[in-house]
Image: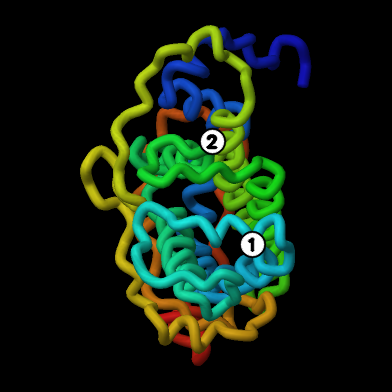
Amino acid sequence: MTPSQKRPMQHIDRKSLYTSLESRIRYLHSFLDFGPNDIEALTSGAKYIQALIPAVVNIVYKKLLQYDITARAFQTRSTAFEGPMDDIPDEDSPQILHRKQFLRAYLKKLCSDPTRMEFWEYLDKVGMMHTGIGRTHPLHIEYIHIGAGLAVIQDILTEAILSHPRLHMSRKIAIVKALGKVIWIQNDLFTKWYVHDGEEFTDGMDFGEIEKEGWLHGKKVLESDSDGEGAEKKANGVSPPSPSHGKGGGVCPFTGMAAGVENLKIGGDAAKRDDDAKSDVTEKGAPQ
């Protein structure tokens, strides 16, 4: 790139990054080049991502229950769960089945419309609640475990997508890149509640009222767990599969989102869909 082709330096107001979530998201989108190309990739890969959710949930909770330091979080009663609790939780404990339901709903939420501010507001609230803010029964999860958990989720999804036998490599790369950006923005929306950066701007700020898990601004934003116990049984014991082996339900509603980010000036061409996109929908074993 010659000097005449360089982009002009943009001004970012530091205070706004800590006092305005919309400004923070706009900056992250710009820095990560999250735009129409990524929406296109998420659209084409939605059914594969959705099919992986039951397996991802089981693998994540197997991992969390391998260590006493992460398992002990499930010995604390959460806001929403009022049922019986096992003193030493395992994968079939009532509190673990309840948490799996929320993780499934959360992963489905990641398959909703990222061009709407509500999408990022909920991801920000998820970060806040893990520090004990906005909960009837405060629960503080140390960030080291948050970061490791997100890494496990990204690792499972990346391997499964890159191992898919029918997707062209260009599509695999585009899907992995788009998912990675969403996960890393979620990581930032966790981290902002743990670090002290910008505290001079946020002292005394009102972070809103206590709400139930899955609610935002008095409205339910997480879908009910339609998979239920059936998904648990199907996914039990599954190692990271390729998306074509999954039995997911429904397709993430990404269609039509690209128009919502047209104002982002992102370089590069959108990932091209391959001819196998249509055939994948009808092939035996593809998610319905």
Q: Residue 71, labelled with which disc?
A: 1
Classify mark 2: residues with Cα within 10 Å, few (<14), some (14-19) or many (20+). many
In the figure, 227 relative to 53: above or below? below
- Residue 48 relative to residue 81: left or right: right
Q: Amino acid at mark 1?
A: Ala
Task: Kindly give the residue lying farthest to the front in the view shown.
Answer: 87
Between residue 187 and residue 273, name the one nearer to us.
187
Q: Secondary structure at mark 1?
A: helix
Q: Position of residue 118 (x, y in %)?
A: 33, 39
Residue at (52% x, 64% y) in the render:
45
Residue at (36% x, 35% y) in the render:
117
Q: Position of residue 142 (x, y in %)?
A: 65, 42
Q: Residue 99, labelled with which disc?
A: none
Q: Which residue is mark 2?
A: 189
Q: Secondary structure at mark 2?
A: helix
- Residue 194 relative to residue 84: left or right: right
